[in-house]
Each structure stands twice: as C-alpha cells, then as structure tokens.
Image (spheres, rainbow, N blue to C red):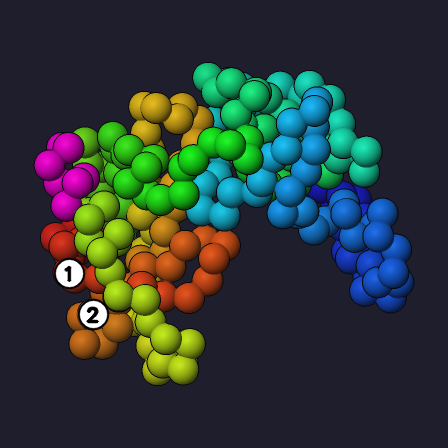
Amino acid sequence: MRKILFLWLLLVCVISIFPGCSWLSSLLVADERVMYDGRVYTVVENVEVDLKKGTDSIMTPIGSLRSGNTVFKIDGLPVNDWIYISWEPNGLYRLGLYKCEELRMDSLEGFNPTKVEIDGERCCEIDDQGVITELVNSIEHGIEVLDSEIAFITPMYVYKASFYSNNFPNLVYEYTLSVNDKQEYYVSARHRGGYTKIDNVFEEYVK
C-alpha cells in the first residue's frame, strides 16, 4: 500500500512539473467525452459506482482506451449505455463513470430512486416510495445558492445522502447534506460543487 501511495504522489508531482505531458495528465484527469468501441460516452458527475460491494464483484475489465486507461463493464448494466474507466487495471483508482452520449439521465428524478441511505447522527435506510419522492422533490426544486453567498454558509453538521435505484443496479447517486447554525439545509453534488438550499424534509432522518 505504501508503495502504491508513493507512486501516486510521484506521478502527481511529475504532472505538476511537466503540465505539457498530456499522456501523463490523461491518467489522472477524466475527459468529458471518450470514444470506446465506436461509441461516444460522456462523464457522469453525480452518479458513482457503488464500490462498497468491491470492484471484483460488480465490474469486469473489457478493454482499454488509446490513453491506456482500463475500461470496465458494470454488472447489471449494458455496456452500450454505461462504462467505468480507471487508470489502474483493478479499478481502484477511478477516472469516472461514463454513460452513452444518447442516454438521458441528468437528474435525480430521472434516476428513479427506490432506496435512500442517510448517514447522520444515526444511520437511516428509507424504502417508502412516498418518502423518497418527497426527498427527491426537495432536492429537485431547491434554490441554487449564488457563488457570492457560498462563503457565508458555515455547516455545523455534514451528512451523506445516498440514493439507489432498481433501474440502475450497482450505481449510487450521492449528495452531501449540510446543516448550518440556523437549521437550514443544503445539498451539494459530489463533483459539481456549489450548494442548493432545500427545505428541512431530511431533518427527522438525520437526528
């Protein structure tokens, strides 16, 4: 493990010293679009592969990109629609989850969640579809916080909300859930950044 960490740090240092080496940068930086087997795939910002199950049990290497990065098939999902890309053959170091360019799924509502796990002061699992719909609507209809106002949000508590869907096995739609000293609730997508202010519908599930 120490050797792997050392090699990772060494690679990062080399890239920072030689930013013009595009082949090195491609190992660590996810491209917005990639071509594989004649199809164009775009990176998915909000959805992750559920790696809690272990990479070996849910992903199978099926090829590689011209950059040398490894392409994986995700069990339960058609490779024509979804692929996972890693710069390491075992899939431990991710570059990203990609979906076919023609596939439309750009919202939590479109993910059609059937289960929610919330890691708060107590861990909570929700499978009541009525409650899930309420949680989803709270996020989908939240108010995006302006960049100029983000600095004034000081979270006192930070939780994680993970949404799962029977339609997309082995994937998870994750949000960070933050609460400030005024008991105001905010969510932020893992890779998109920024905050969306929502109502306090999550309150009873985090305390």
Q: Is residue 51 above or below residue 153?
A: above
Position of the C terminus by quadrant: bottom left
For this view, does 43 lie left or right of residue 70? Answer: left
Q: Quadrant of residue 126?
A: top left
Dividing the picture into quadrants, the one containing residue 104 is: top left
Which residue in the rendered view is the most extreme toward the front? 102
Residue 111 appears at what percent x and percent y?
Answer: 34, 35
Q: Residue 40 appears at what percent x and percent y?
A: 63, 33
Where, quadrant-wise, is the N terminus in this rendering? top right
Question: Residue 120: horizontal and vertical position, in percent?
Answer: 27, 52
- Identify residue for label 2: 184
Classify mark 1: helix, strand or loop.
loop
Q: Which residue is mark 1?
A: 200
Q: Which residues are magenta?
A: 128-134
The total number of labels drawn is 2
Identity, as a three-letter code, of the amino acid under mark 1:
Asn
Looking at the picture, how far across and down is residue 187, in whole percent? Answer: 32, 59
Within 10 angstroms of label 2, few (less than 14), some, or many (20 or more) residues?
Answer: some
> Label 1 near label 2: C-beta < 8 Å?
yes
Left or right of residue 63, residue 41 in this image: left
Left or right, residue 140 beside residue 53: left
